[in-house]
Image (cartoon, helix red, strand yellow):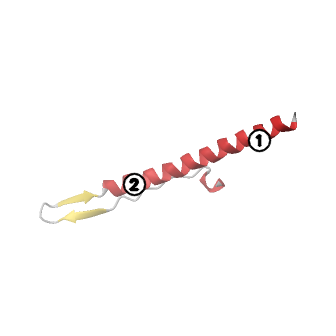
Amino acid sequence: MDKLKDKIITIVVNWSRDEEKGVDIYDTEYAREQFEDAIEDYETYNDMIIEGWNEEQRDYMNDQR
């Protein structure tokens, strides 16, 4: 999971052209989903780091008994 260190999150915002109205429409929902998925990866990574640290502390306490 070290691949997440110093990662830059790039979000693709797809768009389409509404010819009738003459405007570009951006797919913000898809962009939001991409961002939420990336943040979820970081949350999982944080949880793994904290759990690993907690496990080390438990092992240390057990060694001291």
Looking at the image, residue 46 sits to the left or right of residue 11; the answer is: right
Above or below, 16 against 41 in this view is below
Mark 1 belongs to which amino acid? Glu
Query: To which residue does mark 1 refer?
Result: 56
Looking at the image, residue 8 sits to the left or right of residue 35; the answer is: right
Circle on res. 33: 2
Write down the quadrant of residue 46 in the picture: top right
Above or below, 4 against 17 in this view is above
Q: Nearer the viewer, mark 1 or mark 2?
A: 1
Q: Position of residue 31 (x, y in %)?
A: 37, 55
Mark 2 crowd level (few <14, some 14–19, many ≥20, 10 Å Cα): few
Q: Nearer the viewer, residue 42 or 21?
A: 42
Determine whether the residue tagged by mark 1 lies in a helix, strand or loop.
helix
Q: Position of residue 44 (x, y in %)?
A: 57, 49
The N terminus, quarter of image: bottom right
Q: Position of residue 65 (x, y in %)?
A: 87, 33
Residue at x-position 64% and y-position 47%: 48
Residue at x-position 81% and y-position 34%: 61
Q: Nearer the viewer, residue 28 or 51?
A: 51
Write down the quadrant of residue 15 in the picture: bottom left
For the residues labelled 1 and 2, the Cα–Cα distance comes to 35 Å
